[in-house]
């Protein structure tokens, strides 16, 4: 028999998202959940202990969420200028240096000034920078 579940999202919503937030799971099966950390301000200690997942007709599960966010360093913003021939591809790289003793997982933002350039610039959706290393 399927079990219905629902995370208590109002408890962690300002800083985290769990997807899917609710649904059904079949007996003897696994369910992959994606937890996204998206703080809106700098905070060195963001934590939500024992966030409940309500399972209809079953025992409640709990998950603790923790994260650290820092101020955006706008002095290190780098602008790249591209020139290429029509229908030719060109690429450039940006190096990110991690100054901390912990690994960083970054969700880069790629933007352009003009609407006409939208969709032409691509990059990794996630960048993992090792502790005291670069990527």
Image (spheres, rainbow, N blue to C red):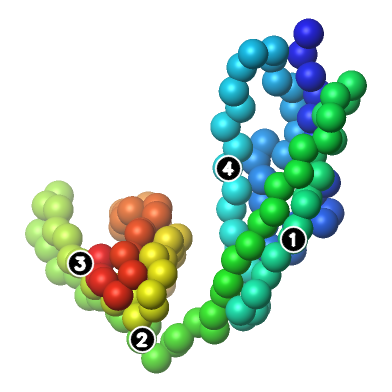
Q: Residue at x 58, y 72 (%)?
A: 68
What separation in Å lies between label 3 and label 4 (alpha carbons)?
28 Å
- The crowd level at tag 3 (other Cα within 10 Å; few <14, some 14-19, many 20+) is few
- Judged left or right of residue 17, residue 56 is right
Q: Secondary structure at mark 2?
A: helix
* Sooner in the amino-acid sequence: mark 3 or mark 1: 1
Rendering quarter of residue 58: top right
Rendering quarter of residue 61: top right
- Marks 1, 2: nearer the viewer: 1
What separation in Å lies between label 1 and label 4 (alpha carbons)?
16 Å
Q: Secondary structure at mark 1?
A: strand
* Sooner in the amino-acid sequence: mark 1 or mark 4: 4
Residue at image mark 4: 34
Label placed on residue 48: 1
Q: Residue at x 31, y 56 (%)?
A: 123
Residue 90 versus residue 34: which sits nearer the camera?
34
Q: Residue at x 43, y 61 (%)?
A: 105
- Marks 3, 4: nearer the viewer: 4
Q: Look at the image and tell me in which quarter the N terminus lies.
A: top right
């Amino acid at each position: 028999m399927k079990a219905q579940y629902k995370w208590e999202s109002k408890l962690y919503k300002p800083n985290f998202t769990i997807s899917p937030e609710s649904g059904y799971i079949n007996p003897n099966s696994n369910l992959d959940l994606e937890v996204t950390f998206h703080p809106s301000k700098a905070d060195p200690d963001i934590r939500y202990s024992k966030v409940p997942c309500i399972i209809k007709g079953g025992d409640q599960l709990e998950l603790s969420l923790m994260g650290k966010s820092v101020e955006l360093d706008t002095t290190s913003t780098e602008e790249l200028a591209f020139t290429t021939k029509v229908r030719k591809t060109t690429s450039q790289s940006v190096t990110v240096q991690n100054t901390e003793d912990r690994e960083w997982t970054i969700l880069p933002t790629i933007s352009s000034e003009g609407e006409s350039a939208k969709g032409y610039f691509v990059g990794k959706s996630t960048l993992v920078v090792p502790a005291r290393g670069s990527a």
